[in-house]
Amino acid sequence: MPFHGVSPESLWAPEERLNESPDQNPGQSSEESSDESSDESSDERVDDNTRPIARIYRCRDQGQDEIALNRTMADADRDARSQPSPPGLAPPGLASPSGLAPPGLGPRAAAPVDPPGRSSPSQNGRAPGNGSAPGLALGFARGSLAVFLKDLRIEVATREIVTTAAFFAALVAILASVAFATGPQTTTRVAPGALWLAVVFSSILALGRTWQREREESALVGLLVSPIPRAAIWCGKAAGVLVFILAVEAVVVPLVALLFHVDLPPIAGPLAMVMVLGSIGVAATGTLFGAMTVRTRARELLLASVLFPLLSPALVSSVAATREIFYAVTSGQAVDLAELRDWFFLLGVFDAVAIAGGMAMFGALVED
């Protein structure tokens, strides 16, 4: 018989409460407890997933703390070494084990002790300071070779400079042969000018594209901050441009000989000397002023406006020497190198001035 105000289910409440977990509220249902257990398991899984990330950040913080500690210790050691030591005491790092200088000698009399694993300047053959002259020359050559090989590998992979420059030079030579056809005298009067105009115009394209590569993705900044002398960077770039120009000339010279009926085998040697000497001046001067105009918007126009007047001595000498060679082959005579001696001398002087000026002025031109 049920009691008034008391339900039969409440009679079993004490036993049910004993079976419940201590964390569960009396009015909480089984569904809510299952939800909480699932949430706790998901939290444990999240902790398992984030634990490696937390470990990575902890290691990073420990590494940064160690770097900061080492830097602080190095600064304190440098400050201690820079402070003058009292009379009779040897500075830190000197040979006296007790920190005292030998009797009767000042603090500067003790010889410095080299750190373990480091040889003295006299042992490795280098003088203190910037190093010996052979070491500097070797570092300069290595830096120039690294820059040169870098440009050469990029060109071998892309083949854009030599291809576009050679195509443009071929167009200039063909148009000149069509526009200035004056009969049998064309070979002597027009062919040298057509040849060198094609070479110089194509050189502008090669120079512009070479420095454009250095502008992309701040590659020039990487070169400037590298441990390579500025003059070595210029030498490497100039050597790369010279190779590109010579590759273009290998295409243009036979084409000009074909268009203007020039017999190349008898004059191959003297003509090669003229082409190489003239190309060195073009590459040296163009590399220097190409670096100056690399950060401007109208690079090609500004480079041509600055470069053509400066190349006038080299162009005049190269065209004159080429004209003498073509005249000798068309008249059936042998090429007399004595007649070309003056032009070779002028080209050599121009090349020497261009190389010296490039090595001296390149560092100032690329500075911000």
Image (cartoon, helix red, strand yellow):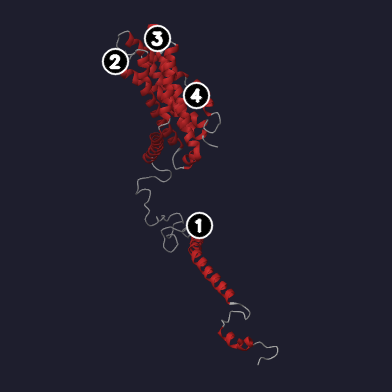
Q: The disc labelled 1 sits on which kind of residue?
A: Arg
Q: Nearer the viewer, mark 4 or mark 1?
A: 4
- The residue singled out by tag 4 in the image is 307
Nearest to N terminus: mark 4 or mark 1:
1
Residue at image location 37% in from the left, 51% down from the top:
120
Mark number, residue 266: 2
Mark number, residue 186: 3
Residue 259 lies, with reference to residue 248, above or below; the image says: above
Q: The disc labelled 2 sits on which kind of residue?
A: Pro
Instruction: Estimate the spatial distance between the alpha carbons at disc 3 and disc 4, rounded to whole Å.
Output: 28 Å
Q: The disc labelled 3 sits on which kind of residue?
A: Thr
Q: Picture coordinates of residue 167 (x, y %)?
A: 42, 24
Q: What element carries label 4?
A: helix
- Quarter occupied by residue 131: top left
The answer to whether residue 309 is left or right of residue 265 is right
Q: Which of marks 1 and 3 is in front?
A: 3
Residue at image location 44% in from the left, 33% down from the top:
234
Residue 18 lies, with reference to residue 148, above or below; the image says: below
- Quarter occupied by residue 349: top left
Q: Which of marks 3 and 4 is in front?
A: 3
Any part of residue 160 in sight:
yes
Using a 10 Å C-alpha cutoff, classify the residue at mark 2 as few (fewer than 14 neighbours), some (14 to 19) or many (20 or more).
some
Instruction: Estimate the spatial distance between the alpha carbons at disc 2 and disc 1, rounded to whole Å.
Output: 70 Å
| Nearer-the-camera pick, 346 or 43 | 43
Asked if the residue under mark 4 is in contact with the one under mark 2, i.e. CB atoms within 8 Å, the reply is: no
Nearest to N terminus: mark 2 or mark 4:
2
Q: What element carries label 1?
A: helix
- The residue singled out by tag 1 in the image is 71
